[in-house]
Amino acid sequence: MLRSLSLLTISCLVLLLSCQKETSFEGDNTPAEGSLLSDVNGDCTPKTVNGTYVAGTAFVASVNTITCDVNVTKKGPYLITTDTINGYFFSATGTFTSLGNNTVTLRGNGTPFSAGVNNFIVSFDSTFCDIQVTVQGTGGGGGGTNAVYTLVAGGTPSNCASAVVNGIYTQNAALTASNSVNVSVNVTTIGAYTLTATGGGMTFTSTGNFTTTGNQNVTMTGSGTPTTSGANTVTFAAPNNSCNFTVNVAPAGGGAAVGTLAGAPGTCSQITVNGFYVASTATGSTNTVGVTVNVTTAGTYTISTNTVNGLSFSSSGNLTVGNNQVINLAASGTPTTAGNQTYTVTFGSSSCTFTVQVLPNDYFPRSVGSNWSYEFNDAANDSLYRVVNPSTLSALGNTYQIFLGNDGTGLDSSGYYRRNGGDYFEWFDAGGYLGYDAPVWGQYIMVKDNVAANTIWKSSGFAGTAQGTPLNVRFSYKILQKDVPVTIASSVGSTTYNNVIVVEEKLEVEITPGVWQDITNTIDFFGKAYYARGIGLILYESLNAAGVVQDKQELRRFRIL
């Protein structure tokens, strides 16, 4: 999912290659050759990380450095760089004047966004090795840093924890291991956390460490003994003490609740399906069905559905007397196939059916009629509509599905895509993307769904001329994160997508035959694409060399057929 480069970028490419060629005529100034030293795990050896790294604190180039060793087999000028992670990178330039082992110091550039352990890939010639850098939180202290997070909003301002209460609660009966509460938190800084909520003689708590940022689910274990029957308000401890949730407690010795499903008989008109459901993907705490009930007699309840397509929904607890009470039935199981599935739910003497759409197990769906709406930089009026056309394109013996796009000027071709196993390909005009003087058609793999995080792959070179200068450019990809939750905030609100693959896209130019150079710093550009399983591209970011987002294309609506 590449975006067209600017004329300025192409001029930088031409200038870079021209300078490389110009120096080659001045004598033996061809690039040095050799290999980075590494151990069996791929870690640079020996390696040293110098300086202190703190989230939000800019680097001092002479202090924040890393060192690695190179076995030089050919003298000459060198460029050794890392990828950009968490807003910063390292690089070194110079000339090797001696063969054999040489120690090189790479200077840091940028400002870390957040605390955590960042794994950098150092590249020289055609070799790679890894170096890990630990970034402290703003309070310092490394591993002792407290996490920074917020409770994800719920249905009302005070009920901001989106809590799912598990188990049955009875007055004067001590809580057991079955009594717990699931809450969703948005982590902005990793570190230690303690989450506590109390009320009605009950305490729910969870302690641990957040090791990744973004939306995460936390299970709080219950303890204590409910003292009061009915609806009990349970409030979080500071700094989240403005948030609460409700635990319904049955009276001591009480029986089963009596009531009916709300809405017209058999219609399930007041049932809400929450979360995304993807074939062959286990459900999580965000997968629930909100069932509205009217209760005439308080007591315990168990509401469940039948099992269809490997998936069912259920909830147990206590209900008080009252109308329009929402019960969240938790999903259980793994959907086996994609498509619309029908479920039956029963409470008391009433029952009804509802439908759950199960999305395909595909990070870039290409089913005919599927469509997506994007906006740019949070501007509601700057949008793009994409739809899968029934027509296909044949090239190199392969069949590509045609996508059409409309940015307000009418539908036009918007890409040609296919999938082979875990590889997703785009057939495109590299000449048009790179600003060449003539079209250069070919394909590249834009995402892989069957490899681990930190996997790197390269495209073939796309050779052409730009402003009369021969260029050969290829794309370098790296899986930054695999199957993580990502929240997109657009003009229509915030949505959290699970099972997201984050792919880094960079460009390399062939400076001499067989020698490729990362040109991120030269063109001050690289990209990140975010693909959600069952949905497709949810976010594309254009970043400068320091890792700061300059432009973004974000999903605001989709329909998969």
Image: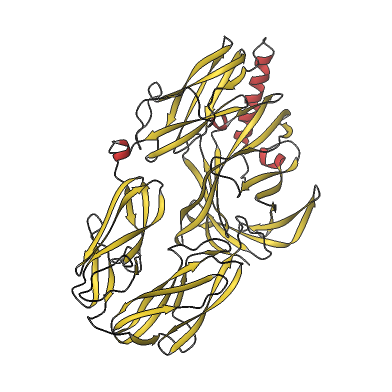
Can you see residue 1? no
**In the visual, does 213 lie left or right of 462?**
left
**In the visual, does 466 lie left or right of 56?**
right
Q: Quadrant of residue 315?
A: bottom left
User: Looking at the picture, how far across and down is residue 218, in whole percent?
Assistant: 36, 57
Q: Name the residue located 68 percent from the left edge and 52 percent from the top edge.
A: 421
309 vs 205: above or below: below
Q: How is the image coloured?
A: secondary structure
Q: Quadrant of residue 34?
A: top right
User: Looking at the picture, how far across and down is residue 301, in whole percent?
Assistant: 35, 80
User: Looking at the picture, how far across and down is residue 168, in whole percent?
Assistant: 31, 74
User: Considering the image in quadrants, where does the C terminus appear?
Assistant: bottom right
User: Looking at the picture, how far across and down is residue 394, in whole percent?
Assistant: 79, 53
81 vs 7: above or below: above
Q: Nearer the viewer, residue 250 or 439?
A: 250
Count up the numbered dots: 0
**In the visual, does 478 lie left or right of 147?**
right
Q: Nearer the viewer, residue 300 or 106?
A: 300
465 vs 156: above or below: above
Q: Name the residue located 40 percent from the left edge and 48 percent from the top edge.
A: 213
Q: Name the residue located 54 percent from the left edge and 24 percent from the top edge.
A: 80
Q: Nearer the viewer, residue 8 or 102?
A: 102
Can you see residue 177? yes
